[in-house]
Amino acid sequence: MEIYYAEGNKKVGPIGKAELQTLIKAKKVTPKTLVWQPGMDNWKELGVFVRSRSGNTDQTKTPSTPVKRSVCSECGKTLSQDEMIRFQDSWVCGACKPLFIQKIKEGVSVAGAMDYAGFWIRFGAILIDGLIMWIFNMLIFIPMGILMPKSPDNPFAVLSFMPLIILLQYAIPAAYDTWFVGKYGATPGKMACKLKIVVADGSRLSYLRAFGRHFAKWLSSMILLIGFIMAAFDEEKRTLHDRICETRVVRK
Ligand SMILES: [Zn+2]
């Protein structure tokens, strides 16, 4: 407890509870002495101050355990957190809760609840994934090239490896996307950019959805990357594959 008291026209303090009691015993401070504490609007007589504090137990508790308050992400009112529900990093008040839950169920964008990642940061994440994939390919295909049988009399021997090479070129990126997105909610490139992929309601993707999303990305690439560029113009920064798979890319 920090308290100030008036001595003539002077403000003395801050003093603690023990010091105050000593002063009361010494009659230097009486019930008529004006006291003030940070947070009080006006000076009060000590007698009145003590009565107001002991009369209301809540008030005495308040300074030690301040009630945490948050802003409702829907209506913008500031309320105590006990009266609100939490959704990811947002708080929603009781009044807005039914409508909010309805919105989540319908998969409508939840204002403020999701911080959608923009086009350029996602582009950065793709570049990082591309680099990782390139290194990975080199690690696989260079040794393969070295180990391939080289017989000058049979130039077609190399061709027999083609189906395997083609398969790997499709399978590696698909496995990379499916495994990382299914397990961690993000590829290493997205993790590096502090992004994650979520379903419209904010939950994590299943492996199946992650796998489907990988192939939906093909579609986005096939139409001259327009599927990717769409994110720059979408309110929720969705690419074509996000639309198909009902996913969003958000900042962590
Ligand atoms: Zn509200």
Image (cartoon, rainbow, N blue to C red):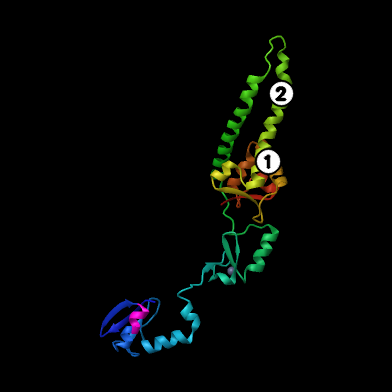
Q: Quadrant of residue 162?
A: top right
Q: Is residue 88 above or below residue 70?
A: above
Amino acid type at image mark 1: His
Which one is in front in this view, the residue at disc 2 or the one at disc 1? 2
- Numbered circle sitting on residue 214: 1
Query: Looking at the picture, does residue 158 appear above or below residue 25?
Result: above
Task: Look at the picture and state if 157 lies above or below 222.
Answer: above
User: Is 63 situated left or right of 220 in this image?
Assistant: left
Q: Position of residue 214 (x, y in %)?
A: 68, 41
Q: Nearer the viewer, residue 221 or 167?
A: 167
For residue 29, the mark is none
Position of residue 108 measured from the top left corner of the image (x, y, whole percent): 66, 58
Q: Position of residue 126 (x, y in %)?
A: 58, 39
Q: Amino acid at mark 2?
A: Met
Q: Is residue 225 magenta?
A: no
Pointer 2 local density, CA inside 10 Å: few below 14, some 14–19, many at least 20: few
Q: In percent of the image, x 70 and y 59: which residue is there?
A: 106
Q: Which residue is mark 2?
A: 162
Between 139 and 216, the one lying in front of the other is 139
Secondary structure predominantly adopted by residues drawn in magenta:
helix
Measuring 63% from the left and 20% from the top, which residue is drawn there? 146
Bounds of the magenta segment = 16-21
Q: Quadrant of the N terminus?
A: bottom left
